[in-house]
Image (cartoon, grey):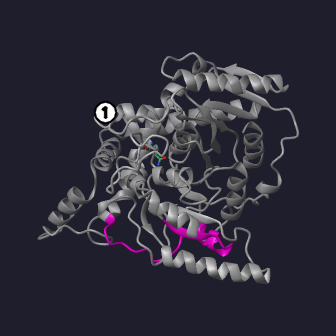
Amino acid sequence: VAYYLSNIQKKAHLNVFLQVYEQEALQQAEEIDYKISQGTQGRLAGMVIGLKDVLCYQDHHLQGGSKILDGFVSQFTATAVQRLLDEDAIIIGRQNCDEFAMGSSNENSAFGPVLNEVDNLRVPGGSSGGSAVGVQADLCHASLGSDTGGSVRQPAAFCGIVGLKPTYSRISRYGLIAYASSFDTIGILTKSVEDAALLLEVIAGKDDFDSTVSHREVPAYSQALSLDKKVRVAYIRDTLQSEGIQEGIRNNMIAKLDFLKNEGHIVEPIELPALDYILPTYYILTTAEASSNLSRFDGIKYGYRSPQSDTLENMYKHTRAQGFGEEVKRRIMLGTFVLSASYYDAYYTKAQKVRRIIKEKTDELLSVYDFLILPTTPTTAFKIGEHTANPLEMYLGDLFTVQANVVGIPAISIPNGTDAEGLPIGLQVMTSYFNESNLLAFSKYLM
Ligand code: GLN
């Protein structure tokens, strides 16, 4: 704890932590030292973990990176966080993120951008940018983030670490601020696959507080990390040809595919025509769900209330106008539009149908292949401010990550070298529902 606290102080300019629980963490550490001396410590004894500012921790502030939750204090602890504590992990603080997890660069935070440690002029990715840099810069051992369309994998790729998004419903969402409920998953950011496996093993599984969580047994992921068979791997042919993908990313992916071929695995190119429809489907459905989820922030129940609240309607209007940032407002408006009576069928219903088709195509593919390999992102970390004027450009960066959330399957981003400038590159692997064990074993093999 002392080590991480001193790093946090030295690297305060990275803007990772919104709050550091210094005294608490030191006290927790002392208690765990005692347990260790008695041989009664939990499985995560002493593991120092940071929490993205979207996870409830009782009696601690929580803002989802937003001004609208100014002053809000959690009344209960998220199930995933409770399970960490029960195994003697130490929570070191809450981490900066894009407002309500909407973004790909951490520039949408009410608390300012997080800086990528590799190059301070570049973004760390988002929305779990603080959680990624926390691990990258050695400010904590691991972080919990959330992944609705890539928010754990994309910043992991930009920061050169591991980012795991498990199957939808594998981890309870109780105590996770909702962005798009049918997409949201808690995700794990670490330096090694071993740590990701151990953390998943601890936090996954059934929970009385989340009726959508899976009741499947949780395998001992950390005990099953060796790959003991030849696997079948698919990659999308276009990804190796497309101009839109940076050369370094393409080359490093080709090198990995060649390695697999040489090792005797089956590696085949496939076509995925549905790829063109995945991003629009994602942005229609997530904005729709977000517009509904965020209607609770009205100035009455949580956090900020505008001083200009002379009438009920003015309170709603001014609180939301002053409390939400630009990107969140844009999404609430888009979502309200696609759910409106005149456009519901044209956009929302159609996107739901396309979601089903994408799911079926992906299922088909993953019944033939064990894994689908993709770049995590088309580019490496971009410059702060590079895409702020053009939200569409920003959305395009999510091209490869959103599929796993649209479908609900597990996906991971692992480091895959760097480009000519030394910027980290991520490699993404997807697999079928609840196949995390094999995904983790395969990822370890690839690293
Ligand atoms: N970048 C994507 C978005 O802005 C993903 C966000 C996320 O996974 N929370 O919606």
Q: Which residue is mark 1?
A: 390
Q: In what quadrant of the picture does the C terminus appear?
A: top right
**Residue drawn at x 54%, y 41% as measured from the top left:** 406
Q: Residue furthest right?
A: 228
**Residue drawn at x 84%, y 41% as measured from the top left:** 227
Q: Which residues are magenta?
A: 69-93
Characterize the local packing of mark 1: few (<14), some (14-19) or many (20 or more) Cα atoms within 10 angstroms: few
Rendered view: 117 above or below 36: above
Residue 374 magenta-drawn?
Answer: no
Rendered view: 76 above or below 403: below
Which quadrant of the picture is home to ligand 1? top left
Q: Position of residue 200 (x, y in %)?
A: 68, 58
Question: As drawn, is 14 to the left or to the right of 232?
Answer: left
Residue 80 magenta-drawn?
Answer: yes
- Between residue 117 and residue 73, name the one nearer to us: 117
Q: Position of residue 348 (x, y in %)?
A: 41, 40
Question: As drawn, is 56 to the left or to the right of 34?
Answer: left
Ligand 1 under 8 Å from disc 1 Cβ: no
Question: As drawn, is 47 to the left or to the right of 226?
Answer: left
**Residue drawn at x 39%, y 54% as measured from the top left:** 13
Q: Position of residue 319 (x, y in %)?
A: 22, 63
Number of marks: 1
**Residue drawn at x 82%, y 27% as measured from the top left:** 265
Mark 1: which amino acid? Asn
Q: In what quadrant of the picture does the N terminus appear?
A: bottom right
